[in-house]
Image (tube, rainbow, N blue to C red):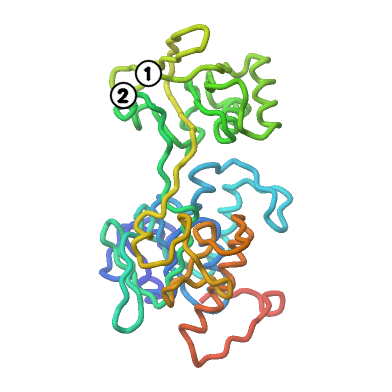
């Protein structure tokens, strides 16, 4: 019990009371520091736990789940073994449930900024808020890295951010009974427009796109067209939002249409969904070998050029790399086996099948 409590950190989920509490300790020590609490990081907790290795996860987002929760929590995923179809949010819930028996620690809402190596061969990872974590192994599972939204060139856009302008839909119920203008032509804009209308969340929804053709999946495009024909979506193509107005919050948008000219449309929310621009962020300065905005690894165990530091999931690169969740699961599994050998060089690890031995926590 004492060791578990010592793993609790600032504003993290306490494994004992299942609550985010502001406990503070100078140093959080564990066996493996996992940077990134997306699906690959969460599954790695399970694989490490089978070898009795403790994990602590760091993520800049306020909740576990990574891109799955931040960008498309309701989007169906079809290529997870054993799941013919599973929503992104549900997959995160199952991964959290799977790893819970091993009582991982979480430092959430804080991005990792610094990596330093100690004299005893361990690493200290410091976050933007100054929280320090120490372990002999660091696994970077940061997905595509740090994301910044692609913003439309609207002069006064920044003054309405979080005042009616949102670049990511985190909680669909936030738009309950509201007038919403979505802008974009990709899967995110199409899928969220469909979701907000199908589930009768938005009171009125307009989808604005600068072209007449869309970049999203054909079935989503057809569904939007059908909804527009039925009067459920106000589809405005050959147009783009060029201005915002309101007293302290968004009250209307200015739409510049190719043939109709300027249209003033009252609204409560403007949601430009033009995608996100990834970058490695501070990780790029950690002395790792970088290629095309990704971390090069050895496919033997997905280790980097710094011994004790691994990169798994979408953030790494190697010949034949596929950016799939299931590939990240495989990478995390092999990385954990290598980590065990590094932590316990004189201890033999005998592979034990869960079908025979089951799963037990610490």
Find numbered disc 1 in the image and state the secondary structure of the residue it sits on: strand
Which residue is depicted at the point 40% across and 67% down?
A: 288
Q: Position of residue 85 (x, y in %)?
A: 70, 48
Per the rendering, the mark at residue 156 is 2
Closest to the observer, 123 or 87 = 123
Q: Image check: 141 left or right of 132?
A: right
Kindly indicate the quadrant of the structure image that contains residue 328. Answer: bottom right
Find numbered disc 2 in the image and state the secondary structure of the residue it sits on: loop
Which residue is depicted at the point 64% across and 82% down?
A: 351
| Distance from Cα at disc 1 to Cα at disc 2 | 7 Å
Which residue is depicted at the point 64% across and 24% down?
A: 224
Q: Earlier in the sequence, mark 1 or mark 2?
A: 2
Which residue is depicted at the point 31% across and 64% down?
A: 114
Q: Image check: 100 left or right of 60?
A: right
Contact between marks 1 and 2 (CB within 8 A): the answer is yes
Q: Quadrant of the N terminus?
A: bottom left
Q: Position of residue 341 (x, y in %)?
A: 52, 84
Residue that label 1 marks: 243
Kindly indicate the quadrant of the structure image that contains residue 212. Answer: top right
């Amino acid at each position: 019990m004492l060791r578990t409590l010592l793993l609790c950190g600032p504003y993290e989920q306490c494994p004992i009371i299942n609550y985010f509490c502001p406990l503070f300790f100078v140093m959080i020590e564990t066996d493996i520091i996992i940077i990134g609490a997306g699906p690959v990081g969460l599954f790695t907790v399970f694989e490490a736990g089978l070898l009795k290795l403790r994990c602590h996860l760091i993520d800049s987002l306020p909740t576990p789940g990574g891109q799955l929760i931040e960008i498309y929590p309701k989007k169906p995923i079809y290529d997870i073994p054993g799941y013919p179809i599973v929503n992104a949010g549900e997959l995160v819930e199952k991964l959290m449930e799977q790893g819970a028996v091993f009582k991982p620690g979480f430092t959430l809402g804080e991005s990792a900024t610094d990596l330093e190596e100690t004299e005893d061969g361990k690493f200290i990872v410091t976050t933007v808020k100054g929280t320090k974590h120490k372990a002999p192994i660091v696994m970077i599972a940061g997905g595509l890295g740090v994301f910044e939204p692609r913003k439309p060139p609207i002069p006064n856009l920044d003054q309405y951010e979080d005042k009616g302008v949102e670049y990511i839909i985190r909680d669909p119920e936030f738009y309950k009974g509201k007038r919403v203008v979505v802008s974009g032509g990709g899967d995110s804009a199409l899928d969220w427009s469909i979701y907000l209308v199908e589930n009768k969340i938005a009171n009125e929804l307009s989808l604005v796109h600068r072209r007449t053709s869309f970049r999203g999946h054909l079935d989503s495009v057809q569904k939007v067209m059908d909804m527009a024909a039925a009067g459920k979506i106000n589809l405005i193509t050959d147009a783009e939002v060029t201005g915002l107005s309101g007293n302290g919050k968004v009250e209307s948008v200015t739409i510049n249409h190719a043939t109709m000219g300027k249209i003033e449309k009252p609204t409560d929310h403007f949601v430009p969904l033009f995608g996100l621009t990834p970058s490695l962020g501070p990780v790029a300065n950690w002395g790792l070998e970088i290629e095309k905005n990704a971390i090069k690894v050895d496919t033997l165990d997905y280790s980097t050029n710094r011994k004790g530091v691994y990169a798994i999931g979408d953030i790494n690169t190697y010949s034949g790399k596929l950016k799939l969740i299931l590939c990240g699961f495989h990478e995390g599994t092999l990385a954990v086996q290598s980590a065990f050998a590094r932590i316990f060089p004189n201890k033999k690890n005998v592979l034990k099948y869960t079908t025979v031995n089951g799963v037990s926590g610490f």
